[in-house]
Amino acid sequence: MPDFEPVLLRRILRQADPALEAYRADGGYRALTKALNEMTPAQVVQTVKDSGLRGRGGAGFPCGTKWTFLPKDHPGPIYLCVNADESEPCTFNNRILMEGDPHQVLEGIILASYATRASVAYIYVRYEYGRAYRAMQRAVEEAYANNLLGRHILGKDFHLDVYLHRGAGAYICGEETGLIESLEGKRAWPRIKPPFPAVEGAFRKPTVVNNVETLACVTHIIDRGADWFKSIGVPPDPKNPRDAGSYGPKLYCISGHVNNPGCVELPLGVTVRELIDKYGGGVWKGRKAKGCIPGGISMGLMTEKEFDTPLDFNGPGKVGCLGLGTAAVTVFDETTSIVEVLYNICRFFAHESCGQCTPCREGTGWMLKIADRIRRGRGRLEDLDLLEELGNGMGIMPGTTICGLADGAGWPVKTAIRKFRPEFEEFIRSGQRIETPALVGAH
Amino acid sequence: MSALGDDIRQQILDLLPRYPRKQAVTLPALHLVQDKLRCVPLEAIREIADLLDLAPAEVYDTMSFYGFFRDERNPLGRTRLWVCRSLACALRGGEEMLQAVCAKLGVRPGGTSADGKITVEFAECIGACEGAPAVLINDEARMNVTPDKVDELIAELSKE
Ligand SMILES: Cc1cc2nc3c(=O)[nH]c(=O)nc-3n(C[C@H](O)[C@H](O)[C@H](O)COP(=O)(O)O)c2cc1C
Ligand code: SF4
Ligand code: FES
């Protein structure tokens, strides 16, 4: 792969001043000026559609297409909800964008609002991101003071208010309708869809929900054009008529047992192996990898043998993972017990299920109990089938739950059992048990 | 006497124009109260409900959904210290870190040190995984906090 010049991280990597003046000196708000002077909202939507940009929040839905689902000629108000709840374990790219270059994100928010005719944008930031919250708050204040927000933005007939709204430590607020319920001041119980938010969202009005990184991409698409965006990444697989392609740059997070954990920006389609060896400094302590989670824990597990899989919207599915997810790769080395990995993941979902759907509430609880039983040396071989069965029974795909948390809870369990079955069987048969609370590879 | 006091009351009222429905101010109001009082007393719930035209039970319903808010029987200490236990941290000693902090302060997760200075909690991924094991001090992450740095950290957070 030829050397790639970072776009989203361009200013962040050289630790540029996040303030408005410095952002402008680096070409910031050029895209917004261009859009307001030369483009209609419909042309902005079309450009984003043409770029092939797909949502970076996990589902990969084409961004421009989602915007066209808003009702035409709606009297308003229309809302934009910026999903800055980033809570998928092992994912931190939204944090880096908001902390390091908040105006890049804000410019995307203003552009998206112009395109969708949204009059208010709410940035829903997870509580844990205090620094990101304050960085975004400062950027919003600067924008108001410089006619980039408020009434008659840059002298045009375009008005927008942007407000930050803090979460309170619940993963489910990242699910778009859980986010909306939480914003409205209720418990974050995801809604049954349809109606989708574009038709009936926040405060029962048409609403667009977009991820922070998606919106940061919009800034550059308007600045450099759809063709530029399409020159990066992977075109659709001709053998797969449903593939919409994987265009543009992507922020990949690398963590776990690597020498240099961090966030790198690369064209979509880099392989797991390349990420680990070339950008993550290789597996730590001179060890080999046993496997990884390739896209946050919800997408399932990959074995080391599957590391040549490209991380685009298509790749992970070919090895039985749920999708690209958040493109956050966490590596575990050969000394790590797969039982501990499973236990850790089950514990997360049992803690974070919102409790609304019985298969998810009870299923995640049972999966944790069984994983814990195995870990304590009281597992039975039948438990492995039971885990798979539980994983298969819960989620939007089997049609038993309201939101995708349950699919994401089942996937790592199913893939762990399917891909690492001999290790689980050996662990159970030999009567091993884990006394320490932690993963073995930590030492 | 009012549990909110005039300043929080005014801060809550100032947020109302941001949203088309008053109920949307529930979470911001709860944050304002807990930041200041270290818990959300029942009287504050009633007063928030009154300001937002809600039943106290509606405010309580939202508040209790998020494990984040404390009632008056169980207030937070001066600093809330969250120790991450999710995968990226657990792979690099996060659980030992949680154990070490609890042992040092003589509390279980959720508990507060005897001097009232530090409340310890476990956290699910706080989005600082490149610096695992990571902790959150109130709302700011600190990275690469390994068990050997526990004494230093506790001393820092216990200072007057
Ligand atoms: C359980 C669950 C958690 C989610 N968490 C997040 C999140 O933290 N951030 C995010 O942007 N999207 C999250 N999503 C995806 C959102 O529902 C939604 O698809 C996304 O915000 C849309 O933005 P995009 O199209 O720009 O990606 C989550 C989905 C589910 C099912
Ligand atoms: S699937 Fe789980 S998290 Fe999603 S709505 Fe149902 S119970 Fe809640
Ligand atoms: S797993 Fe601990 S910060 Fe992400």
Image: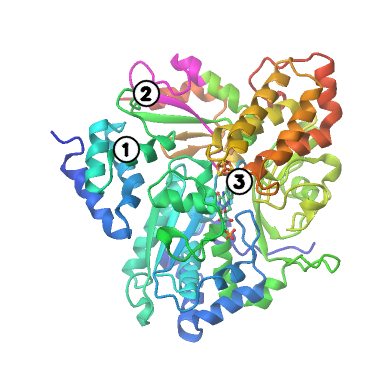
Task: Answer whether labels 1 and 3 touch (C-beta < 8 Å).
Answer: no
Q: Position of residue B144 (x, y in %)?
A: 57, 33
Q: CA distance from mark 1 to mark 3?
A: 35 Å
Q: Which mark is residue A411?
A: none
Choose between B58 and A11: the one closer to the eye. B58
Judging by the rendered image, the residue that carries numbered circle 2 is B158
Q: Position of residue B34 (x, y in %)?
A: 31, 36
User: In which chain is the residue bearing label 3?
Assistant: A
The local secondary structure at tag 1 comes to helix
Q: Residues within 10 Å of mark 2 (few under 14, many from 20)?
A: some
- Provide the residue designation for mark 3: A91
Is B31 placed above or below A71 here?
above
- Same chain under badges 2 and 1? The reply is yes
Residue A17 visible somewhere in the drawing? no
Structural crowding at the residue carrying mark 3, measured as other residues with C-alpha within 10 Å and reported as few (<14), some (14–19) or many (≥20)? many
- Quadrant of residue A432 within the rendered picture: top right
Which quarter of the figure is the N terminus of chain A placed in?
Answer: bottom right
**On residue B57, which mark appears?**
1
Residues drawn in magenta: B101-127
Residue drawn at point x = 54 percent, y = 30 percent: B145
Q: If you read the primary sequence from the N terminus, does the residue marked by circle 2 or circle 1 appear first? A: 1
Q: Report the quarter where the C terminus of chain A lies.
A: top right
Residue A152 drawn at (x, y percent): 34, 78
Amino acid type assigned to the residue bearing label 2 in the image: Ser
Circle 3: residue type? Thr
Between marks 1 and 3 in the image, the one whose residue lies nearer the viewer: 1
